[in-house]
Amino acid sequence: MSATTGQVLSHGALRGTKREYETVTILAPSTNKTDILELVGKVQGIFKDFDASLLQIENWGSRTLAYPIRRSKTGVYLYWRFLGGSDIIRELDRNFEIATAILRYHTVKIDEDIDPSARPSEVTEDLLNAAAEPPPEPVVEPEPEPSERQSSRRFNDEDE
């Protein structure tokens, strides 16, 4: 690693500051708790190597995708919020492309010139275990069938 590892590589950046990023990853629906913990451990290793800090991680559960990705109609969403230099994004992209469990990912820069000591990490072992555990599936209530009167009125309106 070079001497610039973990820094914001921009001429306009203040020294000793980091950028805040958000990443949403979509994992394959077959991903289980141990796979998620393994992925989180790998990403935390990258954060350690690049002097970044994980601020928040959430598991948004399994969701139906707008279109199939790699023949999967659903995916498990993980949300990450972290502080790091601009060089960490390239390394995360490289690792996310290699990971077979990740279907898609998207990273967005939220803020610049953040003092890392002003934003302590809220991540604990309990939070990591909770992020690896998918939340319960949302209960979808069936739509009520329209009554005969409503449906006949609709057809009568069309006939006029």
Image (tube, rainbow, N blue to C red):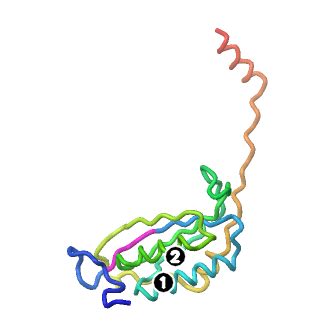
Q: Which secondary structure dominates the residues rendered in magenta?
A: strand
Quarter occupied by the C terminus: top right
Percent across and percent down for residue 125 are: 59, 86
59 or 9, which is in the foreground?
A: 9
User: Residue extending furthest left?
Assistant: 12
Percent across and percent down for residue 65 are: 62, 54
Percent across and percent down for residue 31 are: 69, 70
- Whether label 1 touches label 2, CB < 8 Å: yes
**Residue at (73, 40) in percent of width and height:** 143
Amino acid tagged 2: Asn
Look at the image and give the residue range highlighted in magenta: 18-22
Residue 20 magenta-highlighted: yes
Q: Quadrant of residue 131?
A: bottom right
State whether residue 97 is above or below residue 126.
Answer: above
User: Residue extending furthest right?
Assistant: 148
State whether residue 65 is above or below residue 12.
Answer: above
**Residue at (62, 66) in percent of width and height:** 27
Quarter occupied by the N terminus: bottom left
Q: Quadrant of residue 150?
A: top right
**Residue at (28, 78) in percent of width and height:** 9
State whether residue 39 is above or below residue 103.
Answer: below
Foreground: disc 1 or disc 2:
2
* Separation of marks 1 and 2 at Cα, in angstroms: 9 Å
Report which residue position mark 2 lands on.
95
Report which residue position mark 1 lands on.
46
Give the left or right position of residue 127, taking residue 94 as reference.
right
